[in-house]
Image: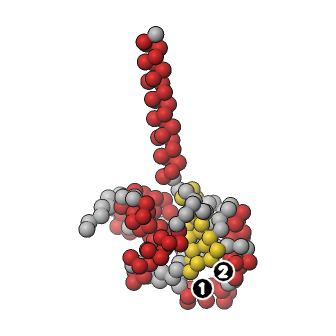
Amino acid sequence: MKISTLFLLVSLFLASSLQAQDKMIKTDSVEIIKDFKGSFKYQNYYLSAQPSLEALRWYKSQGVNKIINLRTEKENKDYSAYAYSEQNIAEELGFEYHSLPIGGSKDYTPENLAKFEKLIKGDEKLLIHCRSAGRATILFMAYLIQHEGYSANEAATIGRQIKFSLPFEKMLDTEISLEMVN
């Protein structure tokens, strides 16, 4: 009786450990959306390069209701001159549309991270994009660290699966460990 009870407890422990491990793997994995170049999904967040009309329709079919566009006003004007006005199309398709222009390093500020955090709050599915998904990835990583409690290395692990890289890591053929220094 004692042996069978012990066996049952050990079996339950191992089964729950495997389930917990399986859940962690799923939580930390980034899905590559193969139909649309430069498109990724992490939990309820879709990060993307500039989406096509077809991609916007697909995101809507996936339950995405909010778009955060990180492209600058000039980028948006240039794009709408030869493609489409994203804001107009997004609103026609029923998206809640937000523009948070991030044009380069001068725009990577605590203030813009705070604005981003207000836009990203909640459990809804949303699309975050820029031209190539690079700025979207950097801003998302900062959000994970600042507001979701991820370590720099945890956020970098997610980011590397999307669009984050340090060029010298490629030269050295190794990942660099990151840590926060205050």
Q: Using the image as rendered, state which of residue 155 and residue 163 is in the foreground.
A: 155
Q: Earlier in the sequence, mark 1 or mark 2?
A: 1
User: Is residue 156 something one can see in this rendering?
Assistant: no
The answer to whether residue 5 shows anywhere in this view is yes
**Residue 128 numbered mark, or none:** none
Residue 42 lies, with reference to residue 119, above or below; the image says above
Residue 142 % position (x, y): 41, 68
Q: Dot 1: few (<14), some (14–19), or many (≥20) neighbours within 10 Å?
A: many
Q: Residue at x 43, y 18 (%)?
A: 6
Horizontally, residue 114 falls left or right of residue 38, namely left
| C-alpha distance separating marks 1 and 2 | 8 Å
Quadrant assignment, res 146: bottom left
Identify the residue shown where x is 74% and y is 78%.
Answer: 92
Residue type of the residue flagged with mark 2? Glu
Q: Measuring from the top left, give residue 155's x and y in whole percent.
A: 41, 60
Q: How is the image coloured?
A: secondary structure
| Disc ID at residue 86 | 2
Three-letter residue code for mark 1: Asn
Q: Which residue is mark 1?
A: 76
Q: Mark 1 and 2 residues: CB-CB less than 8 Å, in contact?
A: yes
